[in-house]
Amino acid sequence: MLENYKEKYKHEGKFIFVPNYECIRKGLRIVEFCRDRLEFPDCFYHYRNGGHVAALHRHLDNRFFFRIDLQNFYYAISRNRVCAALHASGFHKARTYGKWSCVRNPVAEDPRYSLPIGFVQSPALASLVLMRSPIMGAISAAERDSVFISVYLDDLIGSSTDFSLLERAYYTILEACGAANLQVNARKLLPPASEIHAFNCVLKHGLAEVTDERIRKFVASEPSDLAEKAFIAYCLRVQERNFA
């Protein structure tokens, strides 16, 4: 039996896997291959400077927004899809490395083997699978309609100055999620509106800021002086492009 992790544990309701040495070694080779040989779409903000903050700033010029969150994203991606994505990308020994990159699914019977949270290669492999899914086609169609889409791993935000175009993109992407066999988190789903919450931030035309709830939670944690300074700097960075 293939052993590719040292332990697993649960943190905030999510299963985390700690890879062993050989899994880390193979995972780093996949990450290096993706960095040197592949180009991820511009809308993948988890591979861009600034991450989700940069994505929020890019939406500020628009007036209407939606949010789609993919449920149990990694654990919904099967080992077969991982292997197929690696093979299509030209990676040598795709099947072997795909097997080393997956674990027995801890949250569902189907798929039986899936990507885990905690492996160094999981974000890259999930991105490869997403690129090959119907969701990417729906995003491209939305962009042709001048709807801006940002992707941060399992979080998709769309925005536009035209409500009807945004609404059409929203339902098209939802349909694509079903076709891709990636379930949407209904609890976090936010249809087109003039204001939404994403990444514990408020987002609306000309304004992005950390939510009051997130600030209260941080204060209640009795942070150290160093943590408090870092959090204040983060809040200011979220707000720095505001013009509302």
Image: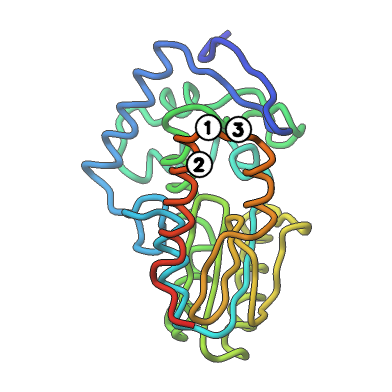
The residue lying at 40 percent from left, 54 percent from top is 51
Which circle, 3 or 2, is nearer the viewer? 2
Report the label total. Answer: 3
Residue, disc 1: 224
Quarter residue 180 falls in: bottom right
- Residue farthest to the left? 36
Q: Which mark is residue 80?
A: none
Identify the residue under disc 3: 114
Compared with 1, 170 (above or below) is below
- Looking at the image, residue 12 lies above or below residue 63: above
Residue in the picture at 58% in, 61% down: 201
Task: Name the residue tied to disc 2.
Answer: 228
State the separation of the CA atoms marked 2 and 1: 6 Å
What type is the residue that disc 2 sits on?
A: Glu
**Lateral position of residue 53 relative to residue 80, left or right:** left
**Would you call the spot at circle 3 few (<14 residues within 10 Å), some (14-19), or many (20 or more)?**
many
Q: Is residue 3 above or below residue 165?
A: above
Pointer 3 or 1: first along the chain: 3
- x, y percentage for residue 8? 63, 17
For this view, does 93 lie left or right of residue 13? left
Q: Amino acid at mark 3?
A: Ser
Q: Secondary structure at mark 3?
A: strand
